[in-house]
């Protein structure tokens, strides 16, 4: 018999909405998980990646993580984990530091037994490394086996990798696949294997409306997966459909019906009615004690969408435009990282810096020379992020959630949140993906091959 807490997507260090209170919230949620694990005396806490929001957490974030891990260690509860796309560093990982201190175990191809179950781990695998991917696992002699990994898997929304492709490469039969990356908790069955996302422990985006929590997974002949909720920061979602003649007064009235004390208030306005200044509503909420207020007037968004999207495929239009810029190899690699590669927004600065440093080290000035956009490009597909290891994270569950928000017509709280589905988007900085207002050096028409970055 084995009973573990399956958690993940903790995102320690995320200063959502630029508020220090929010940063504390992520640590609080992690602490709650650990306290529950100790109180329940589970066999292990299994973490499916993205303990940190960023691959460069501050000393405070690391100290916070250490103190929670120490709580588990003092109680004799092992912390078994893999590396997610948000926190992945180029070589050594934060998890290795914790392991060296005896506070964590980094799961991998060697089974780690807790109770009667063998746990294996697979760090986030970038899309460029999935073709021909094979698990090379050591056998186990436990009653059960589980694989812990981070990424977007089928059969769930935004799934882009079929777990069966992974299962087929090993003789180990898994009772469960314990997943992180998609922040939406969900469970399904593939053949004889249970596949489950534990969900994030605090909202990293206003698209994450459901209660936050984690999984309690029991292996005892059968696998039993239950959800347990966490006490997280109050989010007040107000979705308004204004009627004709209604305006800011009506919005204030509806928002005023809620207890806003210390809450993140997310207002979305749709329908008819008069124009509403977001600032007026936000001020109203803050006056009533809200920690943060965000208002989105979807009526404006709807108008703009109709007006501005006049080409068949926006991605094609952007590719065409970027090609016309005649960017150097270095600039193209940066563009790929910023706009296309799905490196988590919080890591874009870092990854770009590394890429440029590498190019400078290589000492090839040609990499920085503009090209004639009319020239046929033949070497362009070798983008710098293709062989970069885990930090070239190509996908991200946050982005997936954002995509669902976008499908709903945009998410009100995403001004600093998950609106950028291309780059995984839960960084605090506003989006950086636009290049459309750059000056174009010419009007070449050669179709650049580098454009096929997906
Ligand atoms: Mn995540």
Image (spheres, helix red, strand yellow):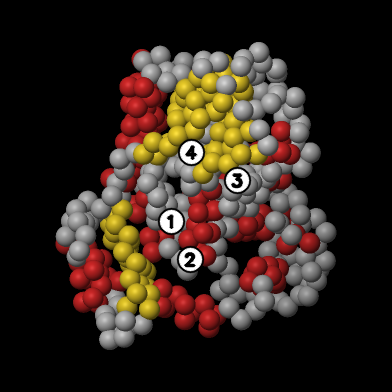
**Mark 1 and mark 2 in contact (Cβ < 8 Å)?**
yes
Q: Quadrant of residue 313?
A: bottom right
Mark 1: few/some/many CA within 10 Å (<14, 14-19, 20+): many
Find the distance from the CA under tag 2 to the CA under tag 1. 10 Å
Q: Is mark 3 within 8 Å of ligand 1?
A: no
Dot label at residue 264: none
For disc 4, the marked residue is: 198
Q: Position of residue 143 (x, y in %)?
A: 61, 16
Q: Earlier in the sequence, mark 3 or mark 4?
A: 3
Q: Secondary structure at mark 1?
A: loop
For disc 1, the marked residue is: 207
Q: Quadrant of residue 280?
A: bottom left
Dot label at residue 152: 3
Q: Position of residue 403 (x, y in %)?
A: 53, 59
For disc 2, the marked residue is: 408
**Along the horizontal axis of the image, is 30 left or right of 329?**
left
Mark 2: few/some/many CA within 10 Å (<14, 14-19, 20+): few
Residue 23 visible to the viewer: yes
Find the distance from the CA under tag 2 to the CA under tag 3. 20 Å
Q: Position of residue 246 (x, y in %)?
A: 27, 82
- Residue in front for this viewpoint, 391 or 151: 151
In the rendered image, the quadrant that contains the C terminus is bottom right
């Amino acid at each position: 018999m084995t009973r573990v807490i399956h958690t993940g997507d903790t995102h320690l260090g995320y200063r959502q909405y630029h508020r220090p209170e929010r940063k504390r919230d992520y640590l609080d949620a992690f602490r709650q998980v650990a306290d529950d694990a100790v109180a329940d005396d589970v066999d292990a806490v299994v973490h499916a990646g993205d303990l940190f929001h960023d691959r460069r957490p501050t000393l405070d974030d690391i100290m916070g993580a250490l103190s929670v891990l120490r709580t588990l260690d003092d109680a004799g509860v092992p912390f078994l984990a893999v590396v997610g796309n948000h926190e992945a560093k180029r070589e050594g990982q934060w998890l290795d530091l914790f392991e060296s201190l005896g506070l964590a175990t980094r799961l991998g191809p060697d089974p780690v037994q807790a109770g009667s179950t063998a746990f294996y781990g697979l760090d986030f695998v970038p899309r460029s490394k999935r073709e021909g991917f094979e698990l090379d696992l050591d056998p186990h002699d436990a009653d059960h086996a589980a694989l812990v990994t981070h990424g977007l898997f089928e059969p769930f929304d935004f799934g882009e990798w079929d777990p069966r492709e992974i299962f087929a490469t090993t003789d180990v039969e898994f009772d469960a696949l314990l997943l992180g990356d998609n922040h939406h908790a969900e469970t399904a069955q593939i053949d004889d294997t249970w596949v489950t996302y534990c969900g994030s422990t605090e909202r990293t985006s206003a698209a994450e409306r459901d209660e936050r929590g984690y999984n309690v997974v029991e292996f005892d002949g059968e696998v039993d997966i239950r959800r347990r909720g966490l006490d997280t920061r109050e989010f007040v979602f107000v979705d308004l459909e204004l009627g004709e003649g209604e305006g800011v007064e009506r919005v204030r009235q509806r928002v005023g019906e809620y207890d806003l004390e210390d809450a993140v208030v997310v207002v979305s306005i749709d329908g008819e009615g008069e124009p509403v200044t977001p600032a007026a509503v936000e001020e109203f909420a803050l006056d009533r004690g809200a920690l943060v207020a965000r208002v989105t007037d979807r009526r404006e968004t709807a108008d703009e969408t109709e007006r501005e999207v006049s080409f068949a495929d926006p991605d094609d239009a952007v590719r065409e435009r970027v090609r016309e810029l005649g960017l150097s190899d270095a600039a193209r690699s940066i563009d790929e990282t910023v706009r296309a590669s799905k490196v988590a927004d919080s890591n874009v600065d870092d990854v770009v810096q590394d890429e440029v440093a590498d190019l400078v080290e290589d000492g090839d000035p040609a990499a920085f020379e503009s090209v004639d956009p009319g020239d046929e490009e033949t070497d362009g597909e070798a983008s710098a992020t293709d062989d970069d290891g885990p930090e070239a994270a190509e996908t991200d569950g946050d982005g997936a959630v954002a995509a669902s928000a976008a499908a709903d017509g945009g998410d009100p709280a995403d001004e600093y949140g998950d609106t950028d589905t291309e780059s995984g988007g839960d960084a605090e900085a506003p989006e950086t993906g636009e290049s459309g207002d750059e000056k174009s050096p010419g009007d070449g028409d050669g179709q650049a091959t580098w454009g096929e970055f997906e």
